[in-house]
Amino acid sequence: MIKAVRGTRDLLPPDTALWNHVEASAREVFRLYNFHEIRTPIFEETQLFARSVGEETDIVSKEMYTWEDHGRAESDRGQSLTLRPENTAGIVRAYIEHKLETRGLNKLYAIGPMFRRERPQKGRYRQFYQIDAEVIGPQSSGSDSAVRDAELLELLATLLDRLGIKGWTLQLNSVGCSNDRAAYNEALRKALEPVKDNMCVDCQRRAVTNPLRVFDCKVPEDQPIIETLPRISQFLDEPCSQHFEQVQSILKAIGLPYQLNDRLVRGLDYYTRTAFEFTHGALGAQNAILGGGRYDGLSEALGGPSAPGIGFAIGEDRLVLALSESAESVQKKPDVYIAPLGAGMDQEAARLARELRSHNIVAELGSESFRLKKSLEIASKIGARFALIVGENEVKTDTFALKNLALGEQLSVPRVELARKIAGG
Ligand code: AMP
């Protein structure tokens, strides 16, 4: 038997109703904050991720699904392509390619699958879904302002609250700009030099090539060493400190609680200044529902114009796990089950179903080969509110037996009143 590939999964009803509920709520909230949807391809040139996310990150060095294309055209052949492991790089690529800077401030969102070859476990998959948002534009559009950071964080709190997700924590940090980062990396390199030989091989390499990435290490034995390393908060220059102060002062003004965490550096190289995660207690080891931050130099690093930006990615799989609502409670049940009774009634039932659906009644259709008892059993099983019986007499008189399945009452209803009756009761 062929099964879904390890780390991928099928999303089935009724769970898909929950997913749709989450996505519909997200779209509603994005609308409130004047975001618009963008859809980028799920594969891109490998270089895009290497240059933005960073060669030395776990994502790029270990987790990407990359292949060499065997296109017919000369220009396709040998091109290295990658299934997107995250969405910001693709969106910034699109920003540059379509010269979106001419539109001023862009507030974009996207919903779709991402791919990383990670060790699968609860809340961690190889194909997972993200809800992304990015605010990006030229400096003159105010895209670098702390107002944007606070607005994005507030949007996230609003979405989580609307979804009824309780007990989240906002972890906040500033990872500084390239100046601060150079000084900080140097300090890390110095501090790591005498201790790196006692660390895992990955950290020994990171200590030399990209010391900041040591904080991504998950090896338990390395943690006491990592704990002693210098903190980024000591290295922020004046403009970065001020920016961070301003983000915090707006969060205080709007009453959005947060925890400072100067160990939060996120696993992608492009972040500058504000970095954040929302965590949730009920998720166990994989407790980050979402993460994001500023990436003021990313557009330039990809050959584009100066375009400060900030964004986030919500792990939709984890968001759904954190919902207290059940899939059954959000799944829409049929309004009516139409039960044809006796030979020749399938056509009549189909006509009625078409009429009722044109009035937005959710109708499920039975078969004349079923006895009434079986039809009523199916109607109850699928949770229909009414059963509509379509027999020869009913068709002749154009008046139908409508049974309210919860109350057990049965009424005789003229055809013209069916839709109103079903919608009303
Ligand atoms: P990142 O792009 O690594 O910052 O991830 C943003 C969010 O995506 C995380 O906070 C998770 O909620 C989610 N996420 C990342 N990787 C996975 C994965 N392998 N499976 C499920 N969700 C993930």
Image (tube, helix red, strand yellow):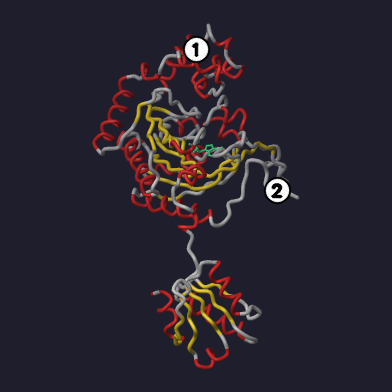
Observer-nearest of 14 and 119: 14
Q: Is residue 72 left or right of residue 278?
A: right
Which of discs 2 and 1 lies nearer the camera? The answer is 2
The numbered mark, 2 or 1, whose residue comes first in the sequence reads 2
Identify the disc placed on residue 232: none
Q: Quadrant of residue 261?
A: top left
237 relative to 280 in the view: left or right: left
Q: Amino acid at mark 1?
A: Arg
Per the image, label 1 sits on a secondary structure element best described as helix
CA gap between label 2 and label 1 equals 46 Å
Find the residue positioned furthest to the right: 1
Q: Is residue 374 left or right of residue 321?
A: right
**Of residues 332 and 195, which is closer to you in this image?**
332
341 and 95: which is toward the camera: 341
Residue 187: where, in percent of width, then height? 44, 12
Which SS class for mark 2? loop
The x, y position of residue 249, in whole percent, is 26, 31
Q: Residue at x 43, y 35 (%)?
A: 279
Which residue is drawn at the image coordinates 38% and 42% (left, top)?
166
Residue 199 vertical placement versus 309 (above, below): above
User: Where is the C terminus found, in terms of image quarters?
Assistant: bottom left
The residue that label 2 is drawn on is 3
Give residue 260's position: percent from left, percent from top: 35, 26
Eyeballing the image, is 229 above or below 151? Answer: above
Q: Residues within 10 Å of mark 1 (few under 14, many from 20)?
A: many
Instruction: Name the mark on residue 189.
Output: 1
Q: Place residue 58 in its image quadrant.
A: top right
| Amino acid identity at mark 2 | Lys
- Give residue 362's position: percent from left, percent from top: 49, 71
